[in-house]
Image: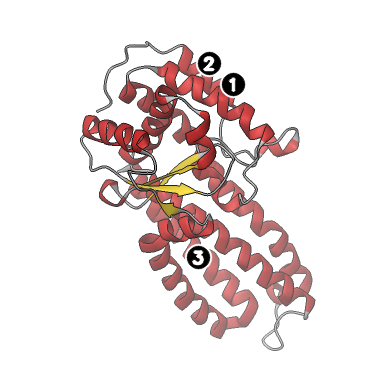
């Protein structure tokens, strides 16, 4: 229920933002065009955000013959959780990472990289897949996928504003909101808006998925061990195609950094996540 409200508010926020941008760029006519654009974007974000994200990373369907161990673990955990088994996809990357996407448990997808399948043992893979299935159970995969799509859209809008500022804003019906300096300021602020939207939903949901995933697989140490390996691997082999708009989807932030960049991380510190898992009861039981 909470995530449905978040999704609705996010779509309303995007619509209002696009309408404002349309008016700033083209007056009333621009606002009408922006309204049509926002309707199309909202439709695409709801129905096709998972396909957009998978296409962005060139993910391909994973067959059972290619990764029987992954299929066996996903099938076991899905049955235990009482949901249909998500479709499995493979990202052609040596980096070790994974994410879940889709609009509901019946249309869920879990994507893993080549690197994570080769790096982790069966127990650690179970911990990771349980974490991703927990995102499905917590009904936050739709919100995450929509944020990924809309954050990219905000970047496109920022680019439009920068070009408009270079060309002097609107040719007619000029007001203060059409001044090139105002347009340039909005273009600078827009990417930060995308980051704030991501931060608003990402950190708490990772802790929640860690806890529920640990209960689902029955041992929090599985995921704790996996996170340790993933953290070390990420520093050695980064995910080169990672984009800021989709960084929050992954189990481990593919754009993690130090200093000021850490303030805008979409994930809690790995050390904090591991500490929480280590403090859980190893026999936590099934997730419900």
- Foreground label between 3 and 2: 2
Query: 155 above or below 174?
Result: above
Q: Please, what secondary structure does the residue beneath circle 3 have?
A: helix
Q: Are marks 3 and 2 in contact (CB under 8 Å)?
A: no
Q: Which residue is mark 2?
A: 275
Of labels 3 and 2, earlier in sequence is 3
Q: Residue at x 37, y 60 (%)?
A: 46
Numbered badge on residue 16:
3
* Distance from Cα at disc 3 to Cα at disc 2: 40 Å
* Distance from Cα at disc 1 to Cα at disc 2: 6 Å
Q: Are marks 1 and 2 in contact (CB under 8 Å)?
A: yes
Residue 6 visible in the picture:
no
Q: In the rendered image, which quarter contains the N terminus?
A: top left
Image x and y of residue 286, in percent: 26, 22
Q: Residue at x 38, y 39 (%)?
A: 67
Q: Please, what secondary structure does the residue beneath circle 1 have?
A: helix
Report the front residue among 7 and 273: 273
**Left or right of residue 87: residue 268:** right
């Amino acid at each position: 229920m909470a995530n449905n409200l978040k999704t609705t508010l996010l779509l309303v926020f995007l619509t209002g933002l696009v309408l404002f941008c349309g008016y700033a760029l083209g007056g009333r006519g621009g606002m009408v065009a922006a309204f049509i654009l926002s309707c199309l974007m909202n439709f695409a974000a709801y129905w096709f955000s998972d396909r957009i994200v998978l296409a962005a990373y060139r993910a391909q369907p994973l067959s059972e013959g290619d990764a029987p161990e992954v299929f066996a673990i996903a099938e076991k955990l899905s049955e235990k959780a009482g949901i249909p088994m998500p479709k499995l996809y493979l990202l052609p990357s040596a980096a070790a990472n994974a994410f879940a996407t889709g609009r509901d448990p019946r249309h869920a997808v879990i994507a893993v990289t080549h690197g994570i399948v080769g790096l982790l043992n069966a127990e650690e893979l179970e911990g990771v897949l349980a974490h991703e299935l927990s995102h499905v159970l917590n009904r936050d995969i739709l919100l995450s996928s929509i944020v990924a799509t809309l954050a990219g859209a905000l970047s496109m809008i920022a680019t439009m504003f920068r070009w408009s500022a270079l060309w002097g804003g609107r040719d007619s019906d000029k007001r203060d909101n059409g001044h090139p300096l105002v347009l340039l300021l909005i273009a600078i602020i827009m990417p930060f808006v995308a980051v704030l939207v991501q931060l608003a939903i990402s950190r708490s949901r990772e802790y929640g998925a860690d806890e529920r995933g640990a209960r689902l697989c029955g041992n929090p140490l599985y995921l704790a061990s996996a996170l340790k390996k993933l953290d070390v691997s990420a520093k050695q082999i980064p995910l080169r195609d990672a984009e800021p708009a989709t960084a929050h989807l992954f189990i481990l932030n593919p754009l993690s950094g130090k200093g000021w960049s850490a303030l805008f991380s979409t994930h809690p510190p790995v050390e904090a996540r591991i500490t929480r898992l280590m403090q859980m009861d190893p026999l936590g039981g099934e997730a419900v």
